[in-house]
Every structure is written in C-alpha cells, then in structure tokens.
Image (cartoon, grey):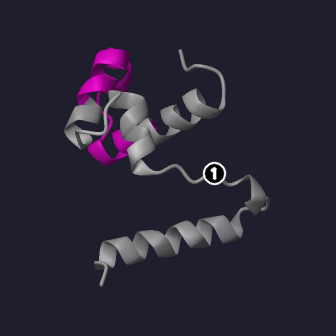
Amino acid sequence: MPGKYVVGTAKWIGRFHQAWPYPEEVIFIHRAKVRWNILKTNKGGDAAITKILEERYGKKIAGIKKHALQALALVITHLECCHAKVE
C-alpha cells in the first residue's frame, strides 16, 4: 500500500490535470528524467540536484527553498527537453 504522501501527490496531479483547460497538452515528467537531465546520471537525489543548480545558476537562485529548487529542476527539464535551452 502506498504511503499517504504518494496518494496525496497522485490525487493532486489528477486534480490539476483535470482542471487544466487543455488536458491533452499536459506533459508528465518522471523524476528519473529530471535526475538524468540535471545530473546526467540516474544516481543522486535532491542534494545532488541542488548542488548542480547552484553551480549552474549561482547567486540567481540564492534563497530559494529546497522544495522550490526541485520544482525549478522540473521546469528546467521541461524547457530543455521540450523547448529551447534555458540561459
């Protein structure tokens, strides 16, 4: 049985997907893809992703909370994999 956080996350992903006016445009990006895009390996976790983002963007991301940095990594992955490169 999955934990309450997994169930809660799945619930909210579904609700956001349902509420989006163009659900066919929704792109689901798995954590492994974010890890591969940022780290170039499937090994490593949040701390490794944070370190790479700090190296890449320096003071621009100073003060951003840990959970927000993981969301930023997701956005960067989406932009780099689906759109033009992020500067």
Q: Quadrant of the N terminus?
A: bottom left
Task: State the residue position of label 1.
Answer: 27
**What is the x, y in percent for residue 21?**
78, 62
Q: Is residue 33 left or right of residue 86?
A: left
Please say whether residue 68 is visible from this viewpoint.
yes
Of 36 and 27, nearer the camera is: 36
x and y percent of residue 74 in the render? 47, 41
- Residue drawn at x 53%, y 66% as measured from the top left: 13
Residue lying furthest bottom: 1
Q: Is residue 7 magenta?
A: no
- Name which residue lies at 28% across and 17% down: 55
- Residue at 43 percent across and 69 percent down: it is 9
> Residue 78 location in percent, x, y?
56, 37
Q: Between residue 3 and residue 33, name the one nearer to us.
A: 33
Residue pictured at 20% horizontal, 38% vertical: 47
- Vertical arrangement, residue 31 with respect to residue 56, above or below: below
Q: Nearer the viewer, residue 66 or 39?
A: 39
Q: From this viewpoint, is residue 71 visible? A: no
Q: Residue flagged by tag 1: what amino acid is it? A: Ile
Quadrant of residue 19 in the image?
Answer: bottom right
Which secondary structure lies at badge 1? loop
Vertical comparison of 32 with 9: above or below: above
Magenta region: 51-72
Q: In this view of the protein, which residue sits in the foreground, 47 or 58? A: 47
